[in-house]
Amino acid sequence: MSCPRLEVDLRKVRHNTRIIVERLAVPGIRVTAVTKAVCGHPAIARAMLDGGAVGLAEARLSNVKRLRQAGMACPITLIRTPMLSQVDDVVQYCEASYNTERAVIAALAVAARQQNTVHGIILMVELGDQREGIRPHDLGDMAQHVVDMPGVALKGIGANFACLSGLAPTAAKMQALTVLANDIDRQCGPFLETVSGGNSANLPWALEQPAIGRINDLRLGEAILLGVDPVTGDQIDGLFSDAFTLVAEVIEVDVKSMQPVVSPADRSSMAGFQNAPDISGTTRLILAVGQQDSDMTGLSMLVGTTLIGATSDHLVISMPDPALCVGSEMRFKMGYAALMRATAAPDIQIHLSNDRPAQYAPGADEPGTYLASV
Ligand SMILES: *Cc1c(COP(=O)(O)O)cnc(C)c1O
């Protein structure tokens, strides 16, 4: 098999989705699966839908087109506010989009009228992450504006947390979103179909809160794909954290001393060199993979393995007494940035395993075959 490659176990993706879908069904929250970290890969998206996600969400129109070209007919929502230059395609390829700008909504409405359709609008509210969003006190006016505009339909409101600021959602913020949803329904009439609480960072809140208010949707990528809580980095109980594995090939094995002979002045310019660990008694390996392929600092190293550094095309690590030689393969579990970059990198081959059987019925994977790996 070719190297470097990304191995994807689709059964683990289906399992992770199904466990989260079942847990969130208890408080009455549905799962919209976010495919941006896998570049809109159609088979991975299909695994998320098979696991029970009600629809897909994407940040990039190019990924949405890839999904549509693969025949995905499910609802797809654009979760990054559309570029004004792309509104025609947004209307053509997406049922709905998250929006924060009047000019964009107006342009979407014009495009939708030209295409004889109605485009769904979900208004993104800023509740503290300080990335995108309408300020809460402007939301009512904006909602009324959307309701009054032919070509678009107000479908819901949403919030986002822990992306730019790292600020996790609190019960008080989520209660504020419920209050805003109730206010809009009172002011504008139509019942909001979707009140989307946020991303994977919302899972602890959603699963621990006795009262989730009006929130009936979460947009989940990382928790499903990597089985981890993005705020704490902890593995989520019962989920696989190894659905994705990066495999790279060893191209040099060397016992040479790695204490670099550099002056302190040179050291500051040694980009990519991780503060020169003492690695006497260890062996240095070079792998044919680099920053161009993935986020090298986002790979999980085996115990005893040290990341020495990475350049665009080389990953240098050290380990005591490796049973590896030139031509050996090494396998790495991946973090979010590593996954995101690997799925977009031209030299990474993606190998899928456990694709769904032709006669797939939801829930057909026998639960007994799963063992959560830690
Ligand atoms: C990326 C993103 C998500 C999904 O985030 P995860 O942490 O992968 O669950 C949800 N909503 C918005 C607006 C996003 O940009």
Image (tube, grey):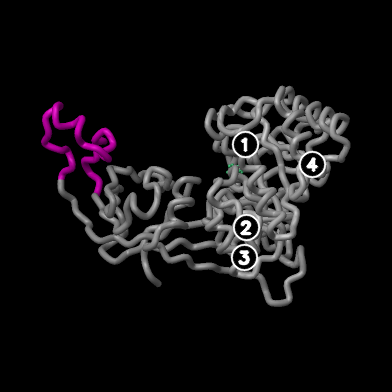
As measured in the structure, the alpha-carbon distance from the residue carrying label 4 to the one carrying label 1 is 24 Å
Helix, strand or loop for disc 1:
loop
Residue receiving disc 1:
101
Helix, strand or loop for disc 4:
loop
Q: Earlier along the polypeptide chain: callout 3 or callout 4?
A: 3
Label 3 crowding class (10 Å Cα cut-off): few <14, some 14-19, many 20+? some
Quadrant placement of the N terminus = bottom left
Q: Earlier along the polypeptide chain: callout 4 or callout 1?
A: 1
Q: Which residues are magenta?
A: 257-283
Magenta region, main secondary structure: loop
Q: Is mark 3 within 8 Å of ligand 1?
A: no
Residue receiving disc 2:
13
The mark found on residue 228 in the picture is: none
Helix, strand or loop for disc 3:
helix
Badge 3 amino acid: Arg
The answer to whether residue 280 is magenta is yes
The mark found on residue 216 in the picture is: 4
Label 1 crowding class (10 Å Cα cut-off): few <14, some 14-19, many 20+? some
| Depth order, front residue of 276/41 | 41
Q: Position of residue 72 (x, y in %)?
A: 66, 66
Q: Position of residue 350 (x, y in %)?
A: 47, 65
Badge 2 amino acid: Val
Residue receiving disc 3:
68
Toward which corner of the image does residue 363 lie, by quadrant? bottom right
